[in-house]
């Protein structure tokens, strides 16, 4: 049996020290830092996390110039820790089970068409056009767990700069849902598989990007995620 059209290329992310990580799916969690929940007008104590997805081909390697997306004039950055899975599972029950799935972690950015998100929230509609557009998931190289152990992030900070100015600076320990807890909750909704990526939420300080802006996201000793915004 032959393909009737050429199959699409697989999306991949470089791994620190060599190799490529094949991307199967991208899961994201919203409302995972109390200060960002408050920044967006929610209540961190009562609002549950929101899960959404991006297509695998939304991934962009660090160093790229990303075109300003279509159909928006309010593009926002959201610096995030990204978790890459090497094993799958469903209905996980313990932190140890969840941790065994992790291949490594990376610095990334959940680019968002904020005007589309606001319209979706008002209408009670899905976030697909706000979150799942082309080039919306830039990432740095993935650091293997043996080189960048998850426990080492307890005291790590997420730093996002735009044109050299620090706009986000928050310890990962202030996440409402920890990485193992996120994996456990996702496994109750989806059968997780090798190649899945999880964007773990953003702290306060998000803001708009314009053509020519340069963004850098740094988390602990992980490779930096860098990108710039080009024309539409």
Image (cartoon, helix red, strand yellow):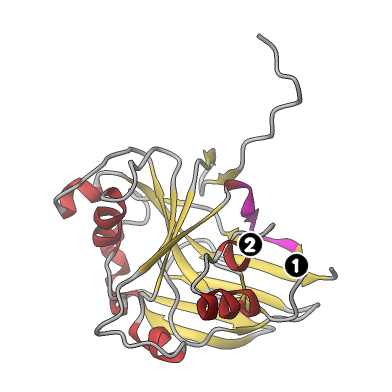
> What span is colored magenta in the figure?
57-65
**Which residue is farthest left?**
94
Total label count?
A: 2
Q: Where is residue 67, by image quadrant? A: bottom right
The residue sitting at 70% across, 12% down in the picture is: 2
- Across and down, in percent, residue 82 comes to 44, 59
Residue projecting furthest to the right: 231
Q: Residue at x 65, y 75 (%)?
A: 215
At numbered mark 1, what does the secondary structure look like: helix, strand or loop? loop
Indicate whether residue 146 is drawn in magenta: no
Q: Residue at x 35, y 43 (%)?
A: 192
164 versus 27 height, above or below: below
Assess whether mark 1 and mark 2 are in contact (beta carbons under 8 angstroms). yes
Q: Nearer the viewer, residue 140 or 198?
A: 198
Instruction: In the displayed orientation, state which residue is furthest to the top.
Output: 1
Q: Position of residue 217 (x, y in %)?
A: 55, 72
Residue for badge 1: 69
Within 10 Å of disc 1 (Cα), the crowding (few <14, some 14-19, many 20+) is many
Residue 72: image quadrant is bottom right
Question: In the rendered image of this protein, does residue 10 appear above or below residue 220?
Answer: above
Which mark is drawn over residue 35?
Answer: none
Q: Which residue is mark 2?
A: 136
Q: Position of residue 204 (x, y in %)?
A: 46, 86
Return the disc, 2 or 1, that comes first in the chain's sequence: 1
Q: Out of 87 and 8, give the one closest to the viewer.
A: 8
Residue 54: image location, x then y, percent: 55, 55
Q: Is residue 60 magenta?
A: yes
**Left or right: 43 in relation to 65:** left
Quadrant hosting residue 232: bottom right
In the figure, is residue 133 to the left or right of 193? Answer: right
Image quarter of the N terminus: top right
């Amino acid at each position: 049996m032959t393909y009737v059209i050429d199959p699409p290329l697989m999306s991949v992310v470089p791994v620190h020290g060599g190799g490529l990580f094949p991307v199967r799916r991208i899961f994201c969690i919203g409302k995972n830092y109390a200060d960002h929940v408050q920044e967006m007008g929610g209540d961190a104590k009562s609002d549950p996390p929101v899960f959404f997805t991006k297509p695998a081909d939304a991934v962009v390697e660090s160093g790229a110039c990303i075109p300003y997306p279509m159909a928006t004039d309010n593009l926002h950055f959201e610096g995030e820790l990204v978790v890459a899975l090497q094993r799958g599972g469903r209905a996980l029950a313990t932190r140890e089970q969840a941790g065994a799935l992790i291949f490594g972690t990376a610095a990334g950015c959940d680019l968002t068409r904020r005007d589309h998100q606001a319209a979706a929230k008002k209408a009670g509609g899905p976030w697909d056009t706000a979150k799942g557009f082309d080039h919306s998931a830039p990432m740095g190289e993935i650091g293997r767990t043996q080189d960048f152990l998850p426990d080492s992030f307890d005291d790590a900070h997420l730093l996002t700069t735009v044109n050299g100015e620090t706009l986000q600076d928050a310890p990962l320990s202030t996440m409402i849902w920890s990485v193992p807890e996120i994996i456990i909750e996702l496994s109750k909704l989806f059968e997780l598989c090798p190649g899945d990526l999880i964007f773990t939420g953003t702290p306060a300080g998000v803001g708009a990007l314009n053509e020519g802006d340069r963004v850098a996201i740094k988390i602990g000793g992980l490779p930096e995620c860098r990108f710039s915004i080009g024309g539409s």
